[in-house]
Amino acid sequence: MQRRRSLIAAEAEGLSVGLVAGVDEAGRGCLAGPVVSAAVILPEVYSLPGLTDSKKLTAGKRQVLAVAIKAQALGWALGLAWPQEIDQVNILQASLKSMQRAVLRLKTRPGLVLVDGNQNIPLDIPQETVVGGDLLVPVISAASILAKTFRDHLLSKLDRRYPGYGLAGHKGYGTAEHLEALRRLGPSIMHRQTFRGVRPPDKPSGQLFLPGL
């Protein structure tokens, strides 16, 4: 439905939309690891039973759908922003940059980008923001699944490189286990130093941002 409205609006303005890409991110509210975005272009006809917001799916179902999305998509790409960049520019700007990188890495340039949320990406491509798009718009749902599955796999690898924090389990979110590990070990270079809970209250590092804001 969202794509149909976009196409109608474009046609009314005399524009040719062509391919439509969906964009979403994963890991915005985490204390550790990068924020990961995915951009996906689906064909007019595809078969992805159960496609929905990645948060509504089990890990196993996400993995099955991720394989199918990559096989059927006309194009897909990822974009990352690592903790050091997040600390420098804040999580919102880092998330938008990761989305921008994902779109720019698509081998085929889309005529329209549908972005999950309410913030435009710095791009010279026509775009629309869709609040709750990862649940409402299939191509954004597909992007949410690719971003989530890639990030979860990456955090499992980072857990082996930075042991003791439990990254493979909580994927960098601020669980009680994670916060306790931070109190015992202090933050690693994979932690977002400007996020509340990462550094002890008596050792602030720059401006503190609540996770996800």
Image (spheres, rainbow, N blue to C red):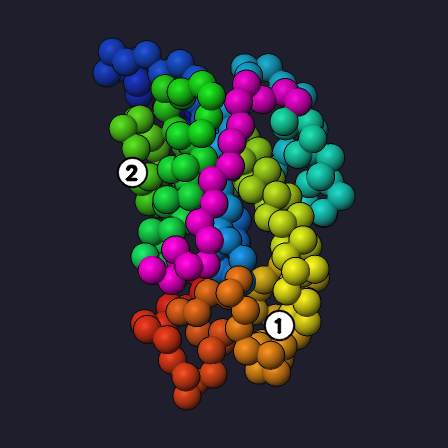
For this view, does 186 lie left or right of residue 155?
left
Q: Is residue 70 visible?
A: yes
Q: Residue at x 40, y 14 (%)?
A: 18
> Label 1 to label 2, Cα distance in Å?
33 Å
Q: Residue at x 64, y 64 (%)?
A: 162
Instruction: Name the residue nearer the viewer: 176 or 16.
Output: 176
Q: Which residue is mark 2?
A: 122
Q: Is residue 86 magenta?
A: yes
Task: Point out the stretch of residues depicted in magenta.
Answer: 71-88
Quadrant containing the C terminus in the rendered view: bottom left
Dot 1: element: helix
Instruction: Name the residue nearer the viewer: 137 or 63.
Output: 63
Q: Is residue 87 magenta?
A: yes
For this view, does 69 lie left or right of residue 106?
right
Dot 2: element: loop
Q: Earlier in the sequence, mark 1 or mark 2?
A: 2
Q: Is residue 54 visible?
A: no
Instruction: Name the residue nearer the viewer: 141 or 80.
Output: 80
Which label belongs to residue 141? none
Q: Which residue is mark 1?
A: 178
Give the x, y percent position of residue 26: 53, 49
Q: Quadrant of residue 145?
A: top right
